[in-house]
Image: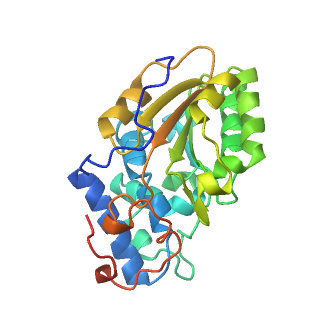
Amino acid sequence: MNEATKVNEDPARADDLDDQSKAIRRRILEVLAKRRVGGHIGPAFSIIEVLLVLYDECLRLPRDSAGADNRDRFILSKGHGCLALYAVLEHKGLISPQELDRFCSVGASLGGHPERNISRGIEATTGALGHGLPIAVGMALAARITGRHFHVYVLVGDGELNEGANWEAAFHAVKHRLSNLTVLVDRNRQQSNGPTENVLPMPYMPALWREIGFDVRHVPGHDRLALREALLAPFSEPRPTVIICETIKGKGLGEFEGSGEWHYKHVTSLSAIPSLF
């Protein structure tokens, strides 16, 4: 799949969330309501389908320590969306319900940004935006140097791509022909302080990645079938891949879909969010 998959630049809103996707969203809200803390709901809700497809169908994760060195790696560079990652890791049995219930409490293992803990499936400490892709490039290059065979996936936000370190890393990935690297862009077109179009426009994103030298795939980011096709299609040799996922910030939040209103808000009760799902 060398050409970008054609998608509507305004992602379709008609796609229904499946039961598993809804359950993950409810779990996140239950945790936040119990803890009465903020958890970057909008950024988390835009990436849930991407993570479910990755963890259910793409990532090669070892059943025991024997295959740990050759496990696939996933880095959530937009670390503020970590509740989506935690809920999916709970779904996969890598963290316990008790750990997730203690989110952001004193002494808890799961904080407001991911902290590296390989036993729990967290490969890198992230949250300072712009660092996840450089880390992923280093991991992919290390695999080649050491003769190991694993794939590195990294999820970045479209607002995060304002950080120049991403593009330095992207050029290095092309230079070193890292076909074991896949970048996923959460293109929800919103940042913490407004639409990306107002903050720093990037209207030609697919063309930009293609010009750099990436294999570009462009999909509706809440469509699990389209995500599966893009992620499971053979990777191009010898270059890295980017999958631009057209998403909706706060997908599943009814009237709050597509807005930045729930980027920072605290959840005091589930009734505080009307029209849920």
How are the colours assigned in the image? rainbow
Residue located 47% across and 80% down the image: 266
Q: Horizontal and vertical percent for residue 177? A: 68, 20
Q: Is residue 143 left or right of residue 61?
A: right
Residue 88 is at least partly visible in this image: yes
Q: Quadrant of residue 128?
A: bottom right
The quarter of the picture where the C terminus appears is bottom left
The structure residue drawn at horizontal position 44% and vertical position 70%, both measured from the top left corner, is 99
Question: What's the residue at 58%, 14% (across, down)?
Answer: 237
Above or below: residue 64 compared with residue 125: above
Whether residue 91 is situated above or below residue 58 in the rendered picture = below
Please name whichever residue, 87 or 36, is drawn nearer the observer in this view of the structure: 36
**For residue 34, above or below residue 209:** below
Residue occupying the point 38% across, 72% down: 98
Looking at the image, which residue sits at the far left?
19
Residue found farthest to the front: 198
Residue 272 vs 252, above or below: the answer is: below
Does any portion of residue 147 appear in the rendered image?
no
Q: Residue furthest top?
A: 237
Q: Position of residue 207 (x, y in %)?
A: 61, 27
Q: Give the image location of residue 180, x and y in percent.
A: 59, 26
